[in-house]
Image (cartoon, rainbow, N blue to C red):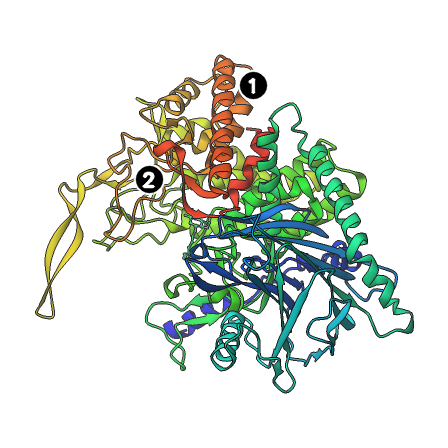
Amino acid sequence: EGEGAATLRRVTRSVTPLAAPRMMDLPQFQSNHKESLYWGTYRPNVYLGIRARTPLSLIAGLMWIGLKNGQYFLRHVCQDSDELSTYGWTAHNGRDYGRQLLVDHGLLLTTSFLKEKGESSGYGGDWAVRLDANSERSGLSDAQESTTHLFFYIADETGKPITMGSHEPSSRGPVLLASGSHEEIGDWKLYLRSEDKLEIHRAGFKSMSMHNLSDLVQQAVATNAMQTGSLNLPDMTEDSSNIMVYQVSIKTPSQIDIVFLSGCASDSAMIKERITRLTGPMLSARLETKQKEFEERYDQIFNVNNKIDSRELSVGIAALSNLLGGVGYFHGQSRIALPKGFTQKNGDKYIPYWPAALYTAVPSRSFFPRGFLWDEGFHQLVIWRWDVHISMDIIGHWLDLLNSDGWIPREQILGAEALSKVPEEFVLQYPSNGNPPTLFLAIRDLASGIHAKQFSDDEAEKISSFLERAYVRLNSWFQWFNSTQSGKYEGTFYWHGRDNMTTRELNPKTLTSGLDDYPRASHPNDEERHVDLRCWMLLATNCIRSIAEFLKMDNALEKDYKKMSNQLSDFGTLNKLHLDDKIGAYFDYGNHTEKVRLRWFDVKDKDVMRREFLRETLQPPRMQLVPHVGYVSLFPFMMGAIPPESWVLEKQLDLISNTSILWTDYGLRSLSRTSSIYMKRNTEHDPPYWRGAIWINMNYMVLSALHHYAHEDGPYKGRAGELYEKLRSNLIRNIVENYHETGFFWENYDQKNKGKGKGARSFTGWTSLIVLIMAESYPTLHR
Ligand code: 6A9
């Protein structure tokens, strides 16, 4: 076989689904379960976006005209540049209720979402959106109070035309805005009702591209403004429009209810009654009940009453709500990079993955509104505790993305809407690149929760059949790591794919590890070994082993896992490979020198002189432990892999508690202040990222371990307990203060500068682990 044929086979395999029964075909994900999750706020990238969990859905959403420094801006897609002083869900149960607050330069908007399946509803039920608009500046006279323009749209991704309702532009309702039909839900109708004075304008468009609705509306308003001088939609509609936009102009305060009814064809549709139930006073009553139920459930599950005060409680509730309100449904095809030097006939350097659906939480609605593999494992630690059915559905979707090699693309950019947010250099996914298998963290909890009889009978039954079906997939995922990320010597692992040619980076990045620019061996080669990856392998092995035991699979595979788990948890081997026994820290091992620096060089390129910021190596690298203390050095500790009586444990507690090394008043820094790379830029354009800042996912892991060692007998029990209390209260205090001060959760927190939030704001991914930190909810770490 020629080289070309082998490459082709490899490429084809990488875009072929794993040959195993699909998770999403499990009976537990069909019928009621599926229907109950049909509609939702599944478009987290916009300020308010509703769709169904189906590839070609009806989608609905909100826009409004914001006024900043005397200029008008159309708000729609979550953007930090809009400078809202806060936006986010203050309540959301992930199913049928949510409440969001948005503050845009003096305009206060509340968006409530409620879903209900009535006797006469069609598939998926009906839903209502309540919009409350208020002005922050009270006391303005009527004349001073300017008009607020809200836009609500509904669009059919299948392209089917939508019929516009007929009504007076100033009627308050209930007025029929639009109607249509969709294969899955039958005939539907959209109504508006309000008791307030309002004006309605509209426009209809025909288009299949839904990712630039903002432009469509902006242009329509701008064109009409030039012709008529008013900021209104033109009240015109294109033939067979499948996108309908309604502009509702109001004076604050105002309240508008919008209600969507499905299954409207039948005579017994009871449309009037359903509108009454889902608008006005009856909607108010329902929303109140839902809010109460939500708070009670939070209380019951996270049981934080005597652990935190009310100022903290509200932040915990917001964290959970934003995580759940950030759950989206995406559909599309990842782009998989072709091997170097290969291009398709049409010039594409990628091949598409199979069309796939992904139901997932997202790290940040404004910055990263899509699925990320290792982020998701952390998200699920919170979500399974809230609603284990939602969590299994999300994990199931991810596991169905396994290809026939056992690989899952790290960053999921599915569909035009998701693609529109990603700079080109980040789009392609490489089938040789891994990312930590953190889903095992959540799966471990599910498996051990069954052992501990923590779940109801119904839940336990579903978790069992879930794990049973997941087993093959988890096994092949594990085997992918085991075969592609292994080191030169048996039982060693390293993140493959680091760039060993680069002269541009101070330290070649390891995006695959999730810790991006965290320092590793300065000169990557195939003899290196990464201690964090070894620990992820340990977690995965133990997890699969315990599932096998639980499923009573007495076969050769199970024996392999037993053997591997014993090998990987052997303390002597771990220490031989990774321990620096002078300071008791765990390190990577590799070809490394500390004597590197970035310097400006004059470079001649095609007779043009340029200045470049390049790496200079002042001393040849040699094989050694990579002496940087930081999150990576704590991985064996995080996994509970150190025996409680070992002297190494004491050393780890020393590293953690030392203020010159990892300890700060706001949480643990990612990298020791004493590291040669601490807070160093990686290139001219790459500021430090995992080189000092405080990240909440890793702090949660450390906290879990401190909690674990505080409950294990041994000489360091008391000290672990003290550090646990202090670290926990530092994290809570700082995240709570930042939230109250800035209105947002942050991607990471400054280790100096008063612990200020940094990076992406409205980062409602793993920062929401603060919910579990408040509740003191941690995994059981068995060695
Ligand atoms: C950039 C820029 C509008 C980086 O939270 C997601 C990931 C983590 O998995 C990873 O560990 N973040 C962390 O180091 C964000 C990655 C964003 C990459 C794409 C696109 C868009 O700007």
Q: Is residue 277 left or right of residue 142?
A: right
- The residue lying toward the viewer, choosing from 472 and 631, is 631
Whichever of callouts 2 and 1 sits on the residue coming sooner in the sequence is 2
- Residue located at (88% from left, 66% from top): 270
- The residue lying toward the viewer, choosing from 176 and 199, is 199
- Spot occupied by residue 749 in the image (x, y as percentages of width and height): 41, 38
Residue 495 showing in the rendered view: yes
Question: Alpha-carbon distance for marks 2 and 1?
Answer: 32 Å
- Spot occupied by residue 729 in the image (x, y as percentages of width and height): 51, 25
* Three-letter code for the amino acid on which mark 1 is drawn: Glu
Local crowd at mark 1 within 10 Å, few (<14), some, or many (≥20)?
some
- Residue located at (59% from left, 40% from top): 543
| Residue 691's disc number | 2
Question: Cβ of disc 2 within 8 Å of ligand 1?
Answer: no
Location of residue 688 (image quadrant)? top left
Query: In this rendering, which labeled residue sits more in front, label 2 or label 1?
Result: 2
Q: In this view, does 129 lie to the left or right of 8?
A: right
* Three-letter code for the amino acid on which mark 2 is drawn: Arg
Local crowd at mark 2 within 10 Å, few (<14), some, or many (≥20)?
many
Label 1 sits on residue: 712
- Residue located at (56% from left, 31% from top): 773
